[in-house]
Image (tube, rainbow, N blue to C red):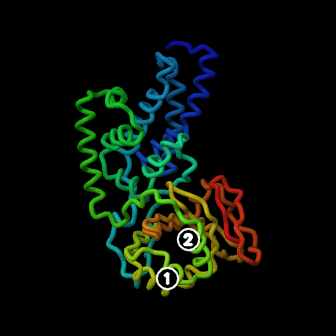
Amino acid sequence: MTQVPVAVESVLAREMEALRRPLLGFCYRMLGSSYDAEDAVQETMIRAWRAMGRLDDPAGLRPWMYKIATNVCIDAATDRRRRAMPMDLAAPDDGRGSPGAPLAESLWLSPIPTGNVDADDPAERALSRESIQLAFVAALQHLLPRQRAVLILRDVLRFRAAEVAALLETSVDAVHSSLRRARASLAEARRGDAAPLAGHEPVDARLLRRYVEAFERFDVDAIVSLLRHDVVVSMPPFSFWLHGQDAFRLWLENNVVACDHARLILTDANGSPAAALYRAGPTGALERSGLHVLHWRDGKIASLHVFLQPALLEQFGLPQILPQASTGPQLEESTGTGGGQRLA
């Protein structure tokens, strides 16, 4: 094994660290889990350091790192059941049912803080955010692992076909063929999608504030007025989900106790506005309860995914318990790394 000079090793270490965020975005798209993606990036870094002496040209660090990450993710995706959303598993409820029993965390697609995977280049940011939306990442999980890798590398990260062929140790023709199949499979997975991509229309801060205030008051009429008529509402880790304003209104009216006395801290996840949910615990203190991820279309909420998994909020840098609320609504900056804000 070739010994890497100390000066070169220092430069490579900095460049490897600079690749950590884009690699995390790649691994997240591949695996559909922020936790699995973190593990995959860590494994990639370990393998890269161990094999650094085999890197012939330091200028080729980026494709070399992606080759390692691709292999790590393909192995992981092959060994595990694909991550899903409730809409993949069950028919919608009419609003009169109950969520039932929670399913294992390993089944679900999980959200990720936008800032953890956002593109540095403003020109690339729109594509980056669209390609981490929950609906898109969920659809990717329907692809075979190698097809998933080819589509992400070509259509999201803009690698050339020859570069992808080198990464996967295959031919350019094979890459083109795999990409065609991946695009067709992705289109099939998205056909009839109950929660279509919301696009990137600017989110009206006033509407977002109205949603937070309405939910904290538990004003059902105000909440429903902000939704599209065909809104999709899901609640992982339950396979339970709702389709349409009327179904969600009925469910809210029947679950006042479950939704009342809540506080929300604004943050962002998967390129979309999000709000951390806090509810009163046994001691009366407001404790982490879950995460609302909102997708907007035509000035209305098109989908609302409520992840009722408190542990998810740790990665957003949000406190476990909120201080007691002061009186009067005012927008306060959160101390969380997720860039959160809260209405206090």
List x then y, in percent, for residue 130.
44, 52
Observer-nearest of 329 and 320: 329
**Residue drawn at 66 percent across, 59 percent down:** 318
Give the Cα distance between marks 1 and 2. Answer: 20 Å
Q: Is residue 274 visible?
A: yes
Q: Is residue 303 visible?
A: no
Check disc 1 and report the residue beneath it: 252
| Horizontal side, residue 223 vs residue 138: left or right | right
Q: What is the secondary structure assignment of the residue under circle 1? A: helix
Residues at circles 1 and 2 in contact by the CB criterion of under 8 Å: no
Q: Quadrant of residue 5?
A: top right
| Horizontal side, residue 181 vs residue 211: left or right | left
Relative to 44, is 273 above or below?
A: below
Relative to 19, is 235 above or below?
A: below
Check disc 2 and report the residue beneath it: 207
**Residue drawn at 45 percent across, 83 percent down:** 249
> Which amino acid lies under the numbered mark 2 shown in the image of this protein?
Leu
How packed is label 2: few (under 14 Cα within 10 Å), some, or many (20 or more)? some
- Number of the label disc, if any, that sits on residue 157: none
Relative to 105, is 244 above or below?
A: below
List x then y, in percent, for residue 134.
43, 57
**Residue drawn at 71 percent across, 68 percent down:** 322
List x then y, in percent, for residue 60.
47, 22
User: In the image, which is nearer the foreground, mark 1 or mark 2?
Assistant: 2
> Which amino acid lies under the numbered mark 1 shown in the image of this protein?
Leu
**Quarter that holds the C terminus:** bottom right
| Horizontal side, residue 298 vs residue 207: left or right | left
